[in-house]
Every structure is written in structure tokens, then in C-alpha cells.
């Protein structure tokens, strides 16, 4: 539903504000589950489709495994008592029976005293034999009266024989209800002759993305539109939780179309997920549709958590219906909080065990008072234990959940968490491994190029700015801290910021400058950056985009502005790319970025400063293999050429 009338938009938002009644997470879960029947349903599944399914009933063997006494080696079946005196100096001589027992051949004769029968691995042991000897311990003799076996080693009763039923006995319970089938269990089912199995039916989860602004990946994008990342994220998450995703595509903000797609989802699935339209905007359409579908309808709209406050939980015709926030991090977080447990229960899986670790927060963290905030964090190992770095990604970030090792909770009434506070981090997944190389500091596209040339290394990269990286290096929390900090007194880059225990490795030069849209008369005709800044400051409609505090670029900008705070100063982007995007999209008129990024975005560029992008290395970590590999890469001629091709100036090895 498009909205061109501001008054109508505000009136609609006011109606939704009255509807929104925020409850805490525990109350939301209680209301939701009170109206759900989470009893799993069963179905018969062919064995070749049973991987990862959950058994709905115990499985009993109808046959013995092995089905018969079976040889474990190539050799000869015989009576152990006949071999008691055998040795290398006095071998036992046994007559060889004419039968050869290959796999699948049923014996026709018995093994009498003083005889032996040729048998292959897996062959059926004949009557009378109670042991098998390996062919390597025998010699054959061809005589006028037939073939004779010379045995040089005594055999014990039962040697190299797997008895019938020794692995699985008929009537034995081999697999139990609730067991998840892996390749190992499927092998057991095949061994007892089962071609199918009774399993819990995977719940079908319909996924519908809503909003006029949503565009399917692969389609042309238009201004103001976004690609539908949520559908792919949620489909994968549904599979991880044990469900079967049913994609319904995208429905715009048209009530008739949306109602039809909701009905399609309810009719064809066990659970319906809508992504987007939960806040004060176009979500009014979804609410009206759900409200008209019958009781109990909407049970919760608004939970006191961050991210994910606008989540809406409903039950329609006995089926869960959940409206997830449109922002990716909010959507996936609320999915795992409220939807994944329902899918797991319907799939016959136990509740996911929450694995937690203790870590220290290395920097101060402000929080919004009034609701529990869940902070995505990257974990790095230090000599004192784990440090939890908050990831500076909003709920709209696609990478927020993907790049996090876990998250920790900030209580609802807390406005500031001090540096050094111990936090309990709930892991996302259960495979927390220390990265081979931990890099904390300033980000650069040249650094991306370097890391891409280190296959096989796991890297933890936290872009917190030059000052943040320098502080992390001082605390021993990283292997490398990329920085570009100029000392205003000496005019030198980086060397004056070192502390004891740190050393500086030369990286490469790069050029910082003002970026602007080509043809902008306030910049295009200027001789230098200083004149361009004067022209920008003289125009109150000329908007800048700044960089975040602690970034080396921010320090350079503040020096250039000499205390002036022009329009847009508090609009703080966290990367060179974000600055360039803001200017290219006409959300700002100028900012500061490196020339490499300016070229990528087709922007004009006025040089301000040639700077040095270097790497601070804690001396205690320099000899680590991953660090040595990275430092060696900096000096390789091929890599230096690739950096130069991007516009960087590789420094001399130090």
C-alpha cells in the first residue's frame, strides 16, 4: 500500500500505536504456546529419503545380523581342535575339501575332522567348522591323492568367525523413538532389510515476504527498494530447525493480494511466517487480515526486546502465524527466539541446548532503557580469556547475525555497560574455534585484498577504527591492528602512537580526499580541498557525511574543519564505502574517503592527504604462523603489484 498523504500515514500510525501492547519475552512465549498443539505428526519415509529425519517409533530387527556364521578373512574353514599342535617346525596337514565358499554361496557339505574348506571374506561358514585360518598362515601341497593344507599356526575356536545374530539379534530394538537418523542409523536400517521407516513429519513452514519495496534477488533494483534477503535466510533457518520451507514469494502492500497469499500459506503449511510490516507503517494491512481470520488471532504484538520489538505472534485455525520484523537481524533473531522452538517441537526434536561462555566487554556500551537488548558480539581470545566485541551493526544489517559468534543480554533498566564488565555470551551454533588471525582496527579495501590471498586461514576482522584497534593491540586482544593515525605535532603517521610491547609494520600508502558528485559546482571547479571546504561551509544547504569517532579519517576531517560543525557533521558513516554511497545517492553532498573507493562509486575526488595505512603488531604475537604469513604477503612482489593496481602505494619492507 503506497502512502502519499502524510496525514493519513500519521493517523494510521497512531491507530497502530494504540494496538501495540508490549510484553516481556517470557509472557509472549507463554501466550503463544498456550494456544499451540505441538504434538508431532508421523509419516512413512523411504530409506533413501530418511537422512536427518526423527524416528516416530522404536525399530525392532526382524532378522539376525549377520544372518549366518560369516568368515572375516580369506582363508580356510576348519575345526580348531585339528590345529592344536601346529607350528612353523611341525605344521598340521589337513585334506582340502573340493568346495569353494565364495560370498553368496551356501555350503553343500560339512567340514569333517582332518579337513578344511576354502572360504572367502564374508562367506558362509559350513557345518562342522568352528574356526577360520588366514591364507597367509598356510601352504598348499598337490599330491596324487588330492590337495593338502599345511597349517603353521594353531587356531582358537571362533577365530575370524562372526556368529549369526552377534551384531543384531532378531527381535532386538536397534533404534529408538526420537532418534535422529544419520548415515550410521540408515546403515543399521538397511542391514535389517528395512526399505522404509516411520518418521516424524517435517513441519511445512510457509514463508511470505511483504512490502512494495521488496524485490526478488536477480531482478533489477529501483531507488528505495531492497532485495529480499529475509526469505533466503528464513528458508535456511527453517531447514536448520528441522522444518521444510514453503516459499510463497513476495506480496506487495495490497490487502486483497496479501489476504490471498496468507490463505494459501495457511492451507498448505503447518506454520506461516510473514516478513515485514510489523511496525507502525504498512503493517496495518497484515493486522486487519489476521484479525479477520478467526480466534484466537493475534496474541502478542510487541515484545520488550532489542532487536525484534515489533514481532507479532498469532494462532489461526490452530496454526502458528508469526509476523517477523522486516530488518534482517531482527527477523532472524526473533525467528530463533519464538519460531525455531515451535518448529523443533513439531519436528520431534528436543529444545536446542543453549551453550554459553563468559567474556569481558572491552569497551563501554550504551543501551536503550526500557527493554532487554541482545547485543551481537564477536569473540576474541586473549591471555586473560575471551573478550566480547559488540558488532556495530543495526537490526537492518544482513551481516549482523552472520558475523557474530553469539550475543549477550543487557538488562532492560541498564543505560550503560562499563568496559571490563563480564558478560555471558550465548553462542550461535556450537563450533566456537579461535581464529587463526585476529585483526581489530581500521578497515580498508586493500586489507580485503590481502586477506583474500590467505586461503586456509580463519580470520576474525573487527572494524572498530584506528583508535579502537590501537587500544585492542595494547590490551593484547588482536594479532594485527591496522591504523592510519597522524600526529598533529610531528605530521608523521602511526609511529608516534606506539606503546611498549608494540611494533609497527609498514603497510601501504593511500590518498584521502574529499568526495563529491561529478559536476557539483561547489567542488568541481576548486583548486584544492581547502577551497572546496570553504565553498561547502558557505552554503547552508551543502550537507556533509562524517566518519565515526575514533576513525583515522575522522581525525583528519576534524583537523580540516578546524572546529566548525557544518550541516551533516553528526551523520557518522562507519566506512569509506558508506561515505561514498551517501554522496553517490544524494543523501549527502560531500565527505572524505580514499581515492580507490571514490573511483568505485564514480565520484569526484580532491586530494587532502597522502597517508600511511600500517599494521601494529603486539610483539608477543609476532612469531605466530598466521601473523608471519600475513607479514610475508606484504612483501611479495605479486601482491605489491595488485595493491598498486588498486591505487595503493606499497611501503618498503621493515
Image (spheres, rainbow, N blue to C red):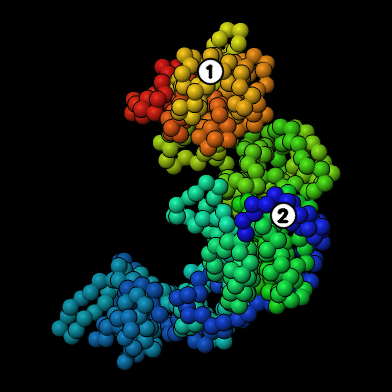
- Mark 2 surroundings: few (<14), some (14-19) or many (≥20) residues within 10 A: few
Q: Position of residue 329 (x, y in %)?
A: 63, 50
Q: Secondary structure beneath disc 1?
A: helix
The residue wearing badge 2 is 8
Q: Residue furthest top?
A: 490
Question: Residue at 44% of width from left, 55% of height from top?
Answer: 218
Q: Nearer the viewer, residue 541 or 268?
A: 541
- Name the disc covering residue 532, or none: 1
Lateral position of residue 187 relative to residue 298, left or right:
left
Lateral position of residue 5 relative to residue 413, left or right:
left
Q: Nearer the viewer, residue 366 or 167?
A: 366
Q: Position of residue 343 (x, y in %)?
A: 64, 68
- In the picture, residue 244 is in which quadrant? bottom right
**Which quadrant is home to the C terminus?**
top left
- In the picture, residue 269 is in which quadrant? bottom right
Lateral position of residue 606 relative to residue 539, left or right:
left
Question: Residue at 41% of width from left, 17% of height from top?
Answer: 652
Q: Is residue 364 visible?
A: yes
Q: Is residue 575 visible?
A: no
Amino acid at each position: 500500500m503506497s502512502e502519499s498523504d502524510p496525514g493519513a500515514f500519521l493517523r494510521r500510525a497512531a491507530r497502530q500505536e494504540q494496538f501495540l501492547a508490549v510484553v516481556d519475552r517470557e509472557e509472549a512465549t507463554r501466550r503463544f504456546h498456550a494456544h499451540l498443539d505441538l504434538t508431532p505428526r508421523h509419516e512413512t519415509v523411504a530409506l533413501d529419503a530418511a537422512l536427518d529425519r526423527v524416528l516416530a517409533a522404536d525399530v525392532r530387527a526382524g532378522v539376525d545380523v549377520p544372518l549366518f556364521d560369516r568368515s572375516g578373512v580369506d582363508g580356510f574353514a576348519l575345526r580348531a581342535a585339528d590345529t592344536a599342535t601346529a607350528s612353523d617346525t611341525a605344521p598340521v596337514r589337513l585334506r582340502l575339501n573340493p568346495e569353494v565358499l565364495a560370498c553368496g554361496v551356501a555350503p553343500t557339505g560339512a567340514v569333517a575332522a582332518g579337513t578344511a574348506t576354502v572360504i572367502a571374506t564374508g562367506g558362509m561358514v559350513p557345518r562342522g567348522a568352528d574356526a577360520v585360518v588366514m591364507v597367509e598362515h598356510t601352504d598348499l601341497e598337490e599330491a596324487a591323492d588330492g590337495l593338502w593344507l599345511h597349517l603353521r599356526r594353531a587356531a582358537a575356536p571362533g577365530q575370524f568367525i562372526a556368529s549369526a545374530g552377534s551384531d543384531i539379534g532378531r527381535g532386538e530394538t536397534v533404534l529408538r523413538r526420537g532418534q535422529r537418523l544419520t548415515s550410521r542409523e540408515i546403515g543399521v536400517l538397511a542391514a535389517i532389510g528395512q526399505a522404509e521407516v516411520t518418521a516424524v513429519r517435517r513441519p511445512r513452514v510457509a514463508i511470505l515476504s511483504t512490502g512494495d519495496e521488496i524485490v526478488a534477488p536477480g531482478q533489477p533494483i529501483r531507488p528505495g527498494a531492497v532485495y529480499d534477503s529475509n526469505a533466503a535466510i528464513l528458508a535456511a533457518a527453517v531447514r536448520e530447525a528441522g522444518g521444510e520451507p514453503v516459499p510463497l514469494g513476495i506480496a506487495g502492500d495490497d490487502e486483497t493480494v496479501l489476504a490471498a497469499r496468507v490463505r494459501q500459506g495457511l492451507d498448505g503449511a503447518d506454520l506461516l511466517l510473514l516478513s515485514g510490516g510489523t511496525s507502525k507503517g504498512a503493517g496495518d494491512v497484515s493486522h486487519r487480515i489476521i484479525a479477520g481470520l478467526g480466534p484466537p488471532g493475534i496474541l502478542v504484538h510487541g515484545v520488550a526486546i532489542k532487536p525484534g520489538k515489533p514481532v507479532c505472534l498469532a494462532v489461526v485455525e490452530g496454526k502458528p502465524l508469526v509476523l517477523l520484523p522486516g530488518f534482517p537481524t531482527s527477523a532472524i533473531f526473533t525467528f530463533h527466539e519464538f519460531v525455531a522452538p515451535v518448529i523443533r517441537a513439531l519436528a520431534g526434536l528436543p529444545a536446542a541446548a543453549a551453550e554459553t561462555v563468559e567474556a569481558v566487554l572491552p569497551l563501554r556500551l550504551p543501551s536503550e532503557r526500557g527493554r532487554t537488548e541482545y547485543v551481537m558480539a564477536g569473540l576474541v581470545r586473549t591471555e586473560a580469556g575471551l573478550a566480547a566485541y559488540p558488532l556495530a551493526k543495526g537490526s537492518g544489517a544482513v551481516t549482523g547475525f552472520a558475523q557474530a559468534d553469539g550475543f549477550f543480554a543487557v538488562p532492560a533498566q541498564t543505560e550503560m555497560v562499563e568496559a571490563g564488565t563480564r558478560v555471558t555470551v550465548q553462542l550461535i551454533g556450537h563450533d566456537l574455534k579461535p581464529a587463526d588471525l585476529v585483526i581489530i582496527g581500521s578497515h580498508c579495501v586493500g586489507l580485503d585484498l590481502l586477506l583474500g590471498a590467505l586461503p586456509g586461514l580463519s580470520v576474525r576482522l573487527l572494524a572498530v577504527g584506528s583508535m579502537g584497534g590501537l587500544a585492542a593491540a595494547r590490551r593484547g586482544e588482536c594479532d594485527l591492528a591496522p591504523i592510519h593515525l597522524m600526529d598533529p605535532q610531528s605530521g608523521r603517521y602511526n609511529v608516534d602512537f606506539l606503546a611498549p610491547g608494540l611494533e609497527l609494520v609498514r603497510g601501504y600508502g593511500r590518498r584521502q580526499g574529499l568526495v563529491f558528485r561529478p559536476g557539483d559546482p561547489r567542488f568541481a571547479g576548486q583548486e584544492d580541498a581547502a577551497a572546496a571546504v570553504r565553498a561547502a561551509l558557505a552554503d547552508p544547504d551543502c550537507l556533509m557525511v562524517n566518519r565515526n569517532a575514533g576513525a583515522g579519517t575522522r581525525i583528519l576531517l576534524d583537523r580540516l574543519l578546524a572546529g566548525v560543525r557544518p550541516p551533516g557533521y553528526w551523520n557518522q558513516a562507519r566506512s569509506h564505502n558508506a561515505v561514498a554511497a551517501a554522496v553517490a545517492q544524494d543523501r549527502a553532498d560531500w565527505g572524505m574517503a580514499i581515492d580507490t573507493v571514490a573511483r568505485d562509486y564514480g565520484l569526484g575526488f580532491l586530494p587532502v592527504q597522502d597517508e600511511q595505512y600500517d599494521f601494529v603488531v603486539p610483539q608477543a604475537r609476532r612469531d605466530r604462523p598466521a601473523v608471519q604469513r600475513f607479514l610475508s604477503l606484504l612483501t611479495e612482489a605479486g601482491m605489491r603489484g595488485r595493491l598498486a593496481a588498486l591505487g595503493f602505494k606499497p611501503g618498503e619492507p621493515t
